[in-house]
């Protein structure tokens, strides 16, 4: 007979629902749903970290990525950067502890919002191959390179250091190198590491990326501009956009002891008058200790905040790629005939500032796929989005735009347009609203859709002007060809017919003919039919 | 064709080139004007009883992207015709011209025969002469039999004469006969016959002799060369012309085209039409009166009757109008040969004499 278990036994078991188990159950949320996506996610987390590290230290990023195939489904991923390096004591925590230093509570435009963090990649490596992750880091040019072999203690969510070393001749300059051995699958085209890195280079024209693919091909994306984007600053959440969970955490951890000072100091755009208004509406005293609010009470200021009239959040702390930089990046990447870009002014959705950028490249080498659908690149905070295109606000805005108006083919005036074009749409925001935890598609808030559409229309109009100009030039040159061909034949035959002894100079007439405005077209002669008398 | 007439045509072709050169010398964009052959510019001339072309002209300008090639081609065709008229006795068919264009300067080649055909009609309209006059000829259709003597020039340049009575099956109206000079004619009327069957019947029954007539085989709708021949004989000798067709609206219209020309040849109808010609029949009344073997009119026949009833060429002639009406009511049509129910000789012995008496 089965043994009856005690509450203590069950509780002990509960504790054993470890991070590893959590990971296994939620791998699809974290970007590890299948081997090919897992490979991409590992590369993505490491590259995001590298770019962030360099930028925060105000160093122009140089990232080296190598993916080697060790077996049919086994890969070694190496990512190295020229960042400031990581101090020795932080290395185990950053790589060996899930959710450590997470940027989750921070409202700042950052790549980090994109994934669960590099430690998830470390865990994935350990779970699929049993291998530790090797981290090498150097913090001063003449210093030593620290080497750690790290695993995660999945029961305690603590780093487990298998090996620690310090060598003199390690990395050449400051920075970090991370090497992971994982189970994965290498694919090419749309959802590939190749495509991700290419798009990353495009979205980060200030970065140089070198990539050696599993097939041994070396891709070098050199930086198009030598200026770092401005550092986006963290802002306090705006009352209109704050979510209950975040507010609850903020209330618990605030150093302020009065609700009114909490409101004035921990969220933006709230002064003493507004703070009072919120407290009155919430039915809470101004002097209540924020830490002491009950669960039910915590919800009340949130509701009250939505009813108080407040200034819009600051928008000037966003860091868009910038029209000029996007164009440089595009020109660096693609030999097209025409480029244009728009960075819209920052605006707000649900209390979150955001800024939309659209750029396009048309013609040139893109003509190889003349009749195919356009290439759409979706970016959020400098990071390419490769999956879930169809549910993304960017895709929706693109397919709901009538591209025929802008000179592209589009069946029925909706859907993905066809033509030799690459379209890039970037959303920069302190909080990108993803449709799900996997963070691959932007939710379609009306404000966001509207901004994307407006930016697309601006670029579309530029495109149309170009296409029209091209068509006009083609017409003109065809016109010239025809006149140059037939005018001599007209005059020569007329000379012979008229028995003219003189040879006439064609040039003045040709000039006149070509420069003349299009002579109004004669109505086409309609030849009388019927009464077939002969032949 | 007389030498003076030939020179006049050559001069008209030359003038097209001169107009272009004059514009060039004035530093103007060369353009030519062609009488428009659109339906809107074809008008019925009640005085001359035929369709003629109105005053509307179309321009063909070297400054128009859609005109310049056709302008060059028109000049090239005019040049070709002039050169052929000057240096040879050759005649060229429209189809041949289409192929000859392959040898011309690059870009002038005709892609389809309809292009060269249109340019030929442009030139006809510009110089007011049918294309046979500048030696672009149709495939011969139609022949002539009777006591008429024609003087023609052989392809080698020899001048010879032929009496059409001396030809076994009648003289085909080909390019040389079309241009031949009428030397002598003892006949006092022309009978133009729609079908070869009836033409042969009249020959064998001695109609040319009995009626002192020239017989013309139309072979269906009369070719322009045949129509011109009929007109020339009529005008030169001042003898009446009779047209003998099948008994249906189509036959009647064959007669009408001889009398009043076609819309398609409006620009040269004054040179082709014989307004005084008379239609013998077979009329709708004949079908009834002679109890001819007949077929029911079909839908296309009724449609044709309706079209012709609206045609201005029929509006003037009460007799033809009445016949069209009668056809509609009768609902029947008959061939010329239906008269043979009364024997071989009947047409010559009874039918035609009666008709000549009626028509005067």
Image (spheres, helix red, strand yellow):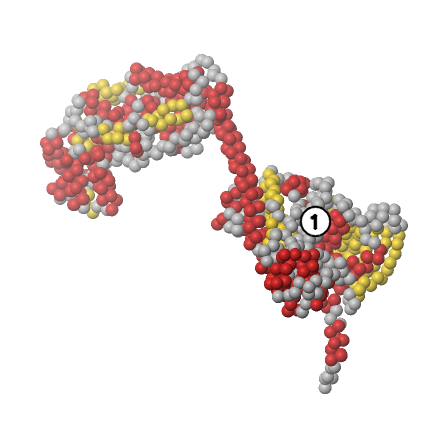
Q: Position of residue A38 (x, y in %)?
A: 70, 59
The part of the image, by quadrant, that contains residue B261 is: top left
Q: Residue furthest bottom?
A: A1
Tell me how many marks there are. 1
Residue at image location 22% in from the left, 25% down from the top: B231
Circle 1 is placed at which residue position? A232
Up the image or down, B94 lies above or below A188; here it is above
Question: How packed is label 1: few (under 14 Cα within 10 Å), some, or many (20 or more)?
Answer: some
Q: Position of residue A443 (x, y in %)?
A: 59, 57
Which corner quadrant holds the C terminus of chain A?
A: top left
The part of the image, by quadrant, that contains residue B304 is: top left
Q: Position of residue B240 (x, y in %)?
A: 16, 27
Residue at image location 34% in from the left, 33% down from the top: A527
Q: Is residue A186 visible?
A: no
Q: Is residue A330 left or right of residue A460?
A: right
Residue at image location 36% in from the left, 22% down from the top: B90
Residue at image location 68% in from the left, 57% down from the top: A264
Q: Which chain does tag 1 point to?
A: A
Q: Is residue B7 left or right of residue B233?
A: right
Up the image or down, A126 lies above or below A320; here it is below
Up the image or down, B287 lies above or below A498; here it is below
Q: Is residue A7 visible?
A: yes
Which corner quadrant holds the N terminus of chain A?
A: bottom right
Q: Position of residue A39 (x, y in %)?
A: 71, 57
Residue closest to the eye, A348 or B7: A348
Q: Is residue B186 left or right of residue A525?
A: left
Residue closest to the eye, A528 or B223: A528
Q: Is residue B289 left or right of residue A106?
A: left
């Amino acid at each position: 007979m089965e043994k009856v278990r005690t509450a203590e036994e069950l509780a002990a078991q509960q504790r054993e629902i470890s991070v590893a188990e959590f990971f296994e159950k939620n791998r699809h949320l974290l970007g590890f749903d299948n081997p090919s996506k897992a490979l991409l996610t590992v590369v993505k987390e490491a590259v995001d970290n590298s770019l962030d590290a360099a930028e925060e230290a105000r160093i122009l990023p140089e990232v080296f990525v190598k993916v080697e195939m060790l077996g049919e489904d086994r890969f070694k991923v190496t990512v190295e950067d020229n960042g400031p390096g990581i101090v020795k004591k932080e290395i185990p925590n950053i790589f060996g502890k899930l959710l450590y230093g997470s940027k989750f509570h921070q409202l700042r435009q950052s790549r980090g919002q994109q994934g669960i963090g590099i430690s998830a990649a470390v865990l994935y490596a350990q779970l699929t191959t049993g291998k530790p992750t090797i981290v090498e880091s150097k913090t001063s040019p003449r210093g030593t390179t620290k080497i750690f072999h790290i695993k995660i203690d999945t029961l305690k969510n603590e780093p487990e250091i298998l090996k620690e070393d310090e060598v003199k001749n390690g990395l050449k300059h400051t920075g970090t190198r991370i090497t992971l051995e994982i189970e994965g699958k290498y694919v090419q085209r749309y959802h590939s590491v190749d495509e991700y890195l290419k798009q990353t280079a495009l979205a980060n024209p200030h970065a140089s990326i070198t990539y050696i693919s599993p097939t041994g091909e070396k891709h070098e994306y050199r930086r198009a501009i030598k200026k770092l984007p401005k550092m986006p600053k963290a802002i306090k959440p705006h009352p209109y956009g704050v979510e209950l969970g975040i507010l609850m955490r903020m209330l618990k951890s605030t150093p302020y002891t009065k609700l009114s000072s909490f409101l004035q100091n921990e969220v933006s755009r709230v002064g003493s008058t507004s703070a009072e208004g919120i407290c009155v509406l919430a039915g809470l005293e101004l002097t209540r200790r924020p830490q002491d609010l009950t669960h039910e009470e915590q919800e009340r200021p949130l509701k009250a905040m939505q009813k108080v009239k407040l200034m819009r959040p600051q928008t000037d702390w966003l860091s868009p790629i910038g029209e000029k930089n996007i164009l440089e990046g595009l020109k660096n990447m693609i030999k097209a005939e025409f480029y244009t870009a728009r960075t819209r002014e920052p605006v707000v959705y649900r209390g979150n500032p955001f800024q939309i950028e659209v750029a396009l490249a048309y013609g040139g080498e893109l003509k190889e796929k003349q009749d195919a659908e356009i290439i759409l690149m979706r970016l959020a905070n400098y990071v390419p989005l490769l999956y879930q295109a169809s549910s993304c606000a960017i895709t929706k805005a693109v397919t709901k735009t009538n591209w025929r108006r802008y000179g592209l083919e589009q069946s029925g005036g909706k859907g993905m347009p066809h033509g030799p074009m690459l379209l890039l749409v970037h959303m920069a925001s302190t909080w990108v609203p993803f449709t799900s935890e996997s963070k691959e598609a932007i939710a379609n808030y009306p404000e966001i859709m509207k901004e994307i559409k407006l930016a697309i229309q601006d670029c579309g109009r530029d495109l149309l002007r170009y296409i029209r100009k091209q068509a006009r030039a083609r017409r003109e040159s065809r016109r010239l060809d025809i006149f140059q061909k037939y005018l001599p034949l007209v005059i020569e035959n007329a000379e012979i017919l008229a028995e003219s002894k003189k040879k006439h100079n064609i040039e003045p007439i040709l000039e006149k003919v070509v420069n003349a405005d299009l002579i109004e077209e004669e109505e086409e002669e309609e030849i009388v039919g019927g009464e077939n008398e002969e032949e | 064709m007389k030498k003076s007439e030939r020179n006049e045509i050559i001069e008209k072709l030359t003038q097209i080139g001169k107009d272009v050169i004059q514009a060039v010398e004035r530093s103007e964009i060369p353009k030519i004007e062609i009488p428009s052959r659109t339906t809107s510019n074809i008008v019925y001339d009640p005085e001359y009883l035929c369709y003629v072309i109105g005053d509307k002209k179309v321009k063909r300008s070297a400054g128009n992207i859609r005109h310049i090639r056709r302008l060059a081609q028109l000049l090239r065709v005019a040049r070709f015709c002039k050169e052929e008229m000057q240096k040879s006795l050759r005649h060229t068919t429209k189809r041949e011209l289409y192929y000859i264009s392959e040898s011309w300067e690059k870009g002038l080649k005709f892609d389809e025969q309809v292009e060269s055909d249109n340019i030929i009609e442009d030139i006809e309209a510009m110089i007011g002469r049918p294309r046979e006059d500048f030696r672009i000829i149709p495939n011969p259709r139609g022949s002539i039999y009777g006591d008429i003597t024609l003087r023609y020039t052989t392809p080698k340049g020899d001048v010879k004469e032929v009496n059409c009575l001396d030809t076994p099956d009648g003289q085909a109206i080909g390019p040389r006969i079309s241009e031949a000079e009428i030397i002598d004619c003892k006949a006092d009327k022309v009978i133009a016959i729609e079908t070869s069957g009836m033409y042969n019947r009249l020959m064998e029954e001695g109609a040319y002799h009995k009626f002192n007539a020239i017989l013309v085989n139309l072979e269906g709708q009369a070719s322009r060369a045949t129509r011109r021949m009929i007109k020339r004989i009529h005008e030169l000798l001042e003898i009446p012309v009779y047209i003998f067709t099948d008994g249906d609206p189509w036959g009647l219209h064959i007669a009408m085209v001889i009398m009043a020309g076609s819309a398609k040849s409006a620009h040269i109808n004054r040179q082709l039409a014989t307004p005084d010609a008379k239609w013998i029949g077979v009329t709708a009344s004949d079908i009834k009166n002679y109890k001819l073997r007949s077929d029911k009119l079909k839908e296309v026949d009724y449609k044709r009757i309706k079209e012709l009833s609206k045609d201005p060429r029929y509006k003037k002639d009460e007799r033809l109008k009445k016949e069209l009406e009668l056809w509609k009511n009768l609902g029947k049509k008959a061939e010329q040969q239906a008269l043979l129910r009364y024997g071989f000789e009947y047409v010559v012995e009874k039918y035609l004499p009666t008709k000549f008496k009626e028509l005067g």
